[in-house]
Amino acid sequence: MICGVTTPKNAVVVLLDSLNRHMLGSYAAAWGNSDEFATPNLDRLAARSARFERHVTGSLPCMPARHDLLVGAYDFLWRPWGSIELWEQPITVDLDEAGVTTMLVSDHPHLFETGGENYHVDFHAWEYARGHEGDAWKTVPDPSWIGTPTLPARTRSDRFYDVSRTYFRAEDDFPGPKVMRTAADWLDANAGKHDRFFLFVDEFDPHEPFDTPEPWVNMYDPEWDDDLIIWPPYATKAVERGVITEREARHIRANYGSKLSMIDHWFGKLLDTFDRHNLWDDTMLVLCTDHGHYLGERDLFGKPNVMQYETLGHIPMLIAWPGAAAQTVDTLTTTVDIHATLREVFGAASPHPTHGNSLVPVLEGSGATDREWAIGGVYGNWVQVTDGHRKYARSAVESNFPLSMWSNRWSTMPTHFRNVGLPKPDRRAYLDYMPHSDVPVIRQPFQPGDMLPFWVSGPVDRHHLFDLDNDPSEAEELAGAGGVVEKEMVDMLVAALDAVEAPREQYERLGVG
């Protein structure tokens, strides 16, 4: 341990959804692109933090990533987007047993929908700022909308937000600013009132809709004179296929930048509370995300059905640690490592297997993690593995089967998107067991023709391999030629599957081992 560096008494984790690493000043400067969008407060945090250079996604997308953080175990190899299961418990329960007060502040609607339930209920207290994205908050527009700060935007009939936004009267009525103000107020009222505390700020910005009021709106596209485009498409070859025009693509990217700069501004209010109460002396502050968001790179938009290129899968993480100087950390890390770090900080145990490595030795300056690989992906989709220098994404071979869903909750993403739930388990289902658990779990095999969970896409024989050190833009495809490197990456993938005790059907589906 470095002299003056101390183990924190408290922890604050701020997750900004869909935060693009390459658009933050502290990261983008290394690429000579630090001035596309202003992020002065994220840069302010970086100036006193460990900046992790090889931090990557695990389970995806939104709720699976939060499962990684709050439960500490990958779930994408067993099930899709879903709630906390009967055989596991969130870190909030572990912290309660360790005498730690826990608080959640969020505007993330998926935490309160079918398929995302049970994540918030074990916090000691929680606040939910209403009105973001698909939050079912209002049923009719506000008839007195004229004069509010929301500007005309192209709407979508399936989005509650287009109604909710008519109720915003000022900038701090928007969900993101409201969350940051609430979190800062909680710290003002609670600093010094608890023996130890954990505050989780799950902020949905800069996720779409990319809707901002003055002075942020059109900050990066002042010449736009049409209705705002706040809903980006989820598409491959978006401009090439005419899904959007090149001009619309630039406008959408600029609107993301406006949202990023707005939430950065309000994040500064949280940093101000750290200054007022000298929380830097005894509180760890983690800034992280679940994944990035394509905004025209490779003519991709949103989170379409492609492997996780660096834009989406190589994510930022900043950790301010009491007494520690700013540093650059090159060790490979992923989201489950945040969970492992919190457990060590608070001396909390987990009753079920977890997959993270604590970062405490790195942050205290006494050592490094022994992570040799990081695995990640989307259920029923590509499975990726990286050593931080090379990245391999493997799809199913020949067929996307065998594939089973393991769950006792049976609520998942299709309910939200299609107004119809995933069919209930049928007579093909049987009881099985998760690694090291005595709780029986329903295992439902799928076959061609079944309705599958929303994110299952079934890519077949589409593998990808990149040398990130020599080809950070992933322009040179190395998969398919065989050779030593591809064999090494297949072996690494098998080792990762073995380490997490993945279902045998994943080996079969991927054609490995």
Image (cartoon, rainbow, N blue to C red):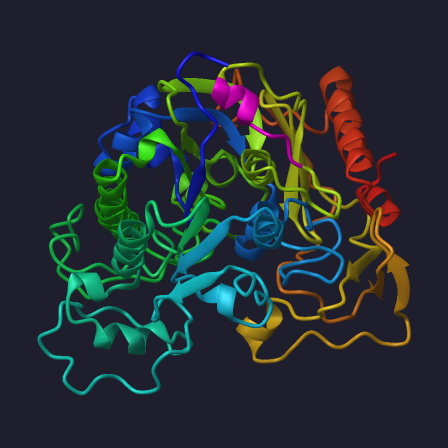
Q: Is residue 460 above or below residue 282?
A: below
Instruction: Specify the segment rendered in magenta.
Output: 356-364
Q: Is residue 471 left or right of residue 381?
A: left
Task: Locate residue 151, reporting x and y percent.
Answer: 16, 67
Q: Residue furthest left?
A: 147
Does the segment drawn in magenta span residue 465?
no
Q: Is residue 362 left or right of residue 279?
A: right
Task: Locate residue 364, reporting x and y percent.
Answer: 49, 20
From the image, which quarter does the C terminus lie in?
top right
Tell me the residue at 50%/64% (across/down).
111
Tell me the residue at 56%/80% (across/down).
419
To which quarter of the image does residue 141 belong?
A: bottom left
Tell me the residue at 69%/74% (across/down).
422
Q: Nearer the viewer, residue 269 or 508?
A: 269
Q: Is residue 109 above or below residue 31?
A: below
Task: Locate residue 250, reporting x and y percent.
Answer: 27, 47
Q: Is residue 496 visible?
A: yes
Q: Nearer the viewer, residue 245 or 124?
A: 124
Task: Locate residue 243, reporting x and y percent.
Answer: 40, 59
Q: Is residue 468 visible?
A: no
